[in-house]
């Protein structure tokens, strides 16, 4: 079988956004206007994907983990035919997304980042309308829609209007809509954003159940715990590049040794860095703004040395944070910044 998804040297560049500025002075009798000026010197294109190579086998629960703006949504957009790549290639179930987007759409279900049902329709009408779009006869779609609502805990809400559903229920309705035509691959873009903790956990159970049925799931997220607990394999992305690819356990094993120590000071941390670099037992010390950071196996021995160095440099700590080896510490070590 071909890979569920495959990208090679995938690149997407968005044109520079127009710059709005006041038009030249106008006669006294004419209203001042704002005009969009495209191609203004200094405007920069946006590189959303930068040579992304990715391959996901059928039946896997795969996650793309990264902060907002990392390129996750653009990747999903290309794979679901909504975004046209600038260069490179992308295939879903062996089908090129540019050459044959219609065939790709027949094989995928898409759950967008924000629920977008037809709010004039009931829950079950939304499913039936979507089924009709794929040419599924009513005799087939009606029982299938009810079965999906039952499976996703919405069996008694079929006749409810969308606005009568909670946020978590609306997201489950979006999953039901994505599954109504029985796709091979389910794409979810940040599916739990905006949900309360209880609704998020309930949605996790739904996704685990779908995966247990053998379905391929591709999900983007910037929640470490979500990626860790749901995915078979993870790709960490930032600024359009794939930085690491492995199982959650394998990625955490690659995290720098020791606990990440972050000390916020009441002034620039650069003045403290030379003394901190000489401390035994502290690896990869760095300073950024008012924050000093480093990794240590023996936290109790490292922190006093950091605080002494800060005091000698005329700085006082305002906050100390400790993070054990995790996907977060791996991401920080790869990019120099946090996931949020």
Image (tube, rainbow, N blue to C red):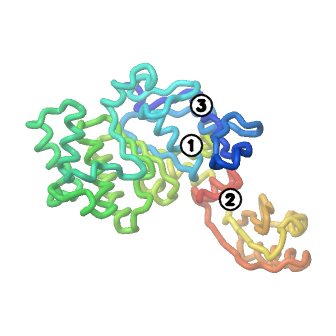
Mark 2, residue position: 257
Q: CA distance from mark 2 to mark 1?
A: 28 Å
Question: Most extreme residue toward the front, as rendered?
Answer: 29
Task: Pinpoint residue 290: horizontal percent, then vertical percent.
Answer: 78, 69
Residue name at image x 56 percent, y 50 percent: 66
The reply to whether the C-beta atoms of the residues labelled 3 and 2 are less than 8 Å apart is no
Q: Which image quarter is the N terminus in?
A: top left
Q: Is residue 107 left or right of residue 135?
A: right
Q: Residue furthest top?
A: 99
Q: What's the distance in space between the residues labelled 3 and 2, CA to CA?
A: 34 Å
Q: Which residue is mark 3?
A: 11
Query: Which of the two labelled residues, at mark 3 and mark 1, occupies the earlier sequence position?
Result: 3
**Relative image position of residue 182 (x, y in whole percent):** 24, 37
Quadrant housing the C terminus: bottom right
Lower position in the chain sequence, tag 2 or tag 1: 1
In which quadrant of the rendered view does residue 4 lie? top left
What's the CA distance linking mark 3 and mark 1?
10 Å
Residue at numbered disc 1: 71
Residue at image point 44% right, 23% down: 96
Residue 326 location (% of width, % of height): 58, 59
In this rendered view, identify the residue nearer to me: 17 or 268. Answer: 17
Q: Is residue 151 above or below residue 134?
A: below
Front label number (3 vs 2) = 3
What is the tally of numbered marks visible in this picture? 3
Give neighbour class at mark 2: few <14, some 14-19, many 20+ (Cα, 10 Å). some
Residue 61 at what x, y percent from top left?
40, 44
Q: Residues within 10 Å of mark 3 (few under 14, many from 20)?
A: many
């Amino acid at each position: 079988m071909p890979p569920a998804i495959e990208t090679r040297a995938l690149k997407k560049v968005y044109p520079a956004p127009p710059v709005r500025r006041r038009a030249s002075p106008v006669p006294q009798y004419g209203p001042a206007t704002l005009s969009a000026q495209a191609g203004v010197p200094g405007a920069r294109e946006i590189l959303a994907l930068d040579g992304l190579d990715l391959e996901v086998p059928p039946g896997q629960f795969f996650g793309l983990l990264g902060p907002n703006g990392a390129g996750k949504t653009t990747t999903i957009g290309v794979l679901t035919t909504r975004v046209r790549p600038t260069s490179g290639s992308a295939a879903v179930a062996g089908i090129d997304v540019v050459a044959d987007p219609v065939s790709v759409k027949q094989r995928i279900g898409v759950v967008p980042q924000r629920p977008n049902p037809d709010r004039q329709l009931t829950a079950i009408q939304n499913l039936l309308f979507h089924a009709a779009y794929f040419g599924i006869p009513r005799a087939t779609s009606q029982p299938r829609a009810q079965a999906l609502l039952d499976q996703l805990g919405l069996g008694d809400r079929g006749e409810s209007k969308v606005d009568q559903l909670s946020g978590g229920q609306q997201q489950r309705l979006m999953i039901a809509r994505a599954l109504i035509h029985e796709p091979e691959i389910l794409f979810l873009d940040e599916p739990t954003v905006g949900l309360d903790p209880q609704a998020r956990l309930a949605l996790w159970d739904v996704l685990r159940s779908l995966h247990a049925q053998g379905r391929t799931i591709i999900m983007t997220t910037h929640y470490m715990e979500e990626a860790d607990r749901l995915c078979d394999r993870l790709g960490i992305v930032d600024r359009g590049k794939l930085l690491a690819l492995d199982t959650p356990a394998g990625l955490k094993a690659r995290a720098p040794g020791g606990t990440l120590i972050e000390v916020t000071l009441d002034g620039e941390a650069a003045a403290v860095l030379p003394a901190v670099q000489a401390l035994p037992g502290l690896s990869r010390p760095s300073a950024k703004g008012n924050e000093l950071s480093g990794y240590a196996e023996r936290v109790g021995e490292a922190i006093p040395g950091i605080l002494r160095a800060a005091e000698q440099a005329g700085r006082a700590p305002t906050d100390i944070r400790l993070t054990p080896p995790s996907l977060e510490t791996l991401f920080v070590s790869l990019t120099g910044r946090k996931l949020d």
